[in-house]
Image: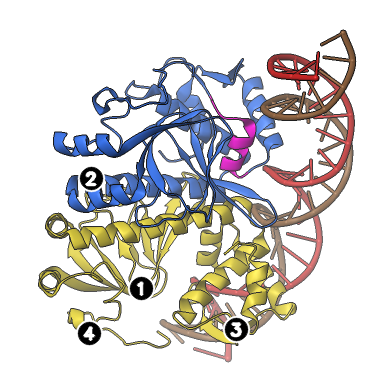
Chain colours: A yellow, B blue, C brown, D red
Amino acid sequence: MADGVQFPAVRVSCQRCDVRGRAICADCAPAELEELDRIKLYRRFAAGEMIAWAGERMPMIGSVIEGVASLSSTLPDGRRQTVGLMLPSDFLGRPGRDRAGYDVQAATEVTFCMFRAQEFERLLERSPRLSHRLLEMKLDELDVAREWMVLLGRKTARERIASLLVMFGEREAGARDGTSGTIRFPLRITREAMADYLGVTIETVSRQLSQLRREGLIRLLESRGVEISDFAALRREAGGPE
Amino acid sequence: MADGVQFPAVRVSCQRCDVRGRAICADCAPAELEELDRIKLYRRFAAGEMIAWAGERMPMIGSVIEGVASLSSTLPDGRRQTVGLMLPSDFLGRPGRDRAGYDVQAATEVTFCMFRAQEFERLLERSPRLSHRLLEMKLDELDVAREWMVLLGRKTARERIASLLVMFGEREAGARDGTSGTIRFPLRITREAMADYLGVTIETVSRQLSQLRREGLIRLLESRGVEISDFAALRREAGGPE
DNA sequence: CCCGTTGCTTGATCTGAATCAATGAGAGTC
DNA sequence: GACTCTCATTGATTCAGATCAAGCAACGGG
C-alpha cells in the first residue's frame, strides 16, 4: 500500500514477481517455474476479509505476494490467539491436508499467488527442489512459532510490544544494516490484530505504545506509522536474546 | 521406566524398535532401513542431563526412542520457556543446521537413536520417502507449537494444567478410545518442567493440581502418577476446541 | 543418625494486565 | 451537517497469578 508495485488481480509473470527469490519457487528450475506459472492464479482479498475458516475445506494453497494475512485460533468462548502472521513470500496451506487448520484472515489488503491444492501436490511429488524448499520454509516457520512461544509464555506486555516493533523493523530494514539510524515504517495492522498476536488486550497495546512514545523510544506517526530513532535501545526493551 | 522395554545403550535392530512405524523411518523401504541401521547409534541420557545447548554445535540428530526431552529457550535474565516436548518417535534436530536452536535437556531418562548429521543429510537427499516423512513430522510439530501458542497466549492456569493432563492422557491412551473409563498414568516430568512448558510458575502448577484434586477431577498418586476418572470432564476444563 | 539437597505443597502479599467505562478522531453516508 | 462506524486512547477498578516465605517428605551421604 505504502510503496511497492501494485499488482492487478490478474496473472503476472513469475520472472517479474516481487517474491520470486524467497518464496516457495525460489529454487525452481526454469521448467518447474513454467509448470507453476501454468497452474497459478492471482487472487486479491480486502482488509478484514476471511480467506479460510478453521476446519473448512481449503482447495487453494499458495504464496503471499503482498500484504499481511493472519492465522488464528479461536476458543469456544471467543478468546482468540493469532498463531502466525503471513508476510510476503510466506507459503499458506498444508499440502496433504484439505482442511484449514486455522482461521485465515486478510489483516491488510492481500494479494495471493494460489494453486489448486491437488495440482500443487502432484508437482511437489515430482520436484525434490520444491519439496526441499517447502521443508526449509516450514522449519523457519516452526522456529518463528517457538520464538513467539517464549514471548507468549514469559515476556511482559512492554517486551511484547517492543518485540513486535523490532520484528517489523527488521523485516522492513530487510537487507539493510537496520541496527542504527532512524527507521520509519507503517505498522499496517490494527491494534486488535497486534493484541491477538501478542496475547494481550487492545488496551494494553495502546497503553504500552503510549508509554514507549512518552519515553521517547518511538514516535507514532499518522496512518499507523512508527519511527524508531534508536533501534538498538528498542531491541534492549524487547528482552529477547537475539 | 514404569513399563515398556528397557533398552540397553547398544544397537538394537530397527525391526524390533518400539517406534519403528511412527518415527522418521516409518515409510522407509527395507534398503533404506538398512542404510539407517548402519549409521545409527543408540545413546542414553540421564534425567536432567543436557543433550544440547542453544547456539552450540550439535553433530548428532535423531529420534527419541524412550523418555521425554525438552526444548527450551532462556531469556538473558533467566526466564525460561519450554517450546517443545520430544516424546518417543519425535525427531530431534534440524537437518541443514549444525547448531542447536534451543537447549535440549533430558526431562526423564532418555534413549536416543542418533545419526551423524552429515550422513543423515546425505541420505535425506537421496530418499524422497525419508524427506517426505520429515516434512510431515515437522508440519505436525508446527501444529502442536501453534496449539501451544493458544494455551500460552490465552488460557488460564487451570486450563493450562488440564490441557497438559489431557495431552498426556491422550498420548497414554494411544490407540485406545481414551474418552471414557478411568485412566491412570505417570506424569514422568517434574513440576518445574511442567511450569516451564505451561508458562506459569511451579507454585501455580502445584496449586492448580491440588485444586483439581480437591474437586475430584483427578487423583494424585505416588511417584508422579495421576488418575483421571472422567476424562471428558477434564477435557471440558481444558478449554480447547479439540 | 544427622545433615544437606531436591521436589513439592501451602499461605500471605503484591502487582501487572484484564476488565469496565468513557471519550475522541476520522471516514463514510444519508 | 448530523449520523453512525470503526479504531484508538485513557482512566478507575479488579483479580489471577507472581513473588516471597515457610515447611514437609523422601533420599543419599558421611
- Of discs 3 and 2, which sits in the foreground? 2
Of the residues shown, which amino acid type is indicated by label 2?
Leu
Q: CA distance from mark 3 to mark 2?
A: 44 Å
Occupied quadrant, residue B90: top left
Of the residues shown, which amino acid type is indicated by label 1?
Pro
Relative to A193, B75 lies left or right? right
Residue at disc 4, secondary structure: helix
Stretch in magenta? B187-199
Is C12 rendered above or below residue A42? Answer: above
Percent x, y for residue A191? Answer: 55, 69
Q: CA distance from mark 3 to mark 1?
A: 24 Å
Percent x, y for residue B214? Answer: 66, 21
- Residue that label 3 marks: A180
Same chain? Circles 2 and 4: no
Asked whether B198 falls inside the magenta stretch, the response is yes
- Of discs 1 and 2, which sits in the foreground? 2
Q: Which mark is residue A16?
A: 4
Chain of the residue under the numbered disc 3 shown in the image: A
Badge 3 crowding class, 10 Å Cα cut-off, few under 14, some 14 to 19, many 20 or more, is few
Tell me what residue is drawn at x 56 percent, y 62 percent.
A195
Of the residues shown, which amino acid type is indicated by label 3?
Ser
Asked whether B171 falls inside the magenta stretch, the response is no
Q: Which mark is residue B130?
A: 2
Q: CA distance from mark 3 to mark 4?
A: 32 Å
Query: Quadrant location of the C terminus of chain A?
Result: bottom right
- Residue that label 1 marks: A88
Asked if labels 2 and 3 touch by Cβ distance under 8 angstroms, the answer is no
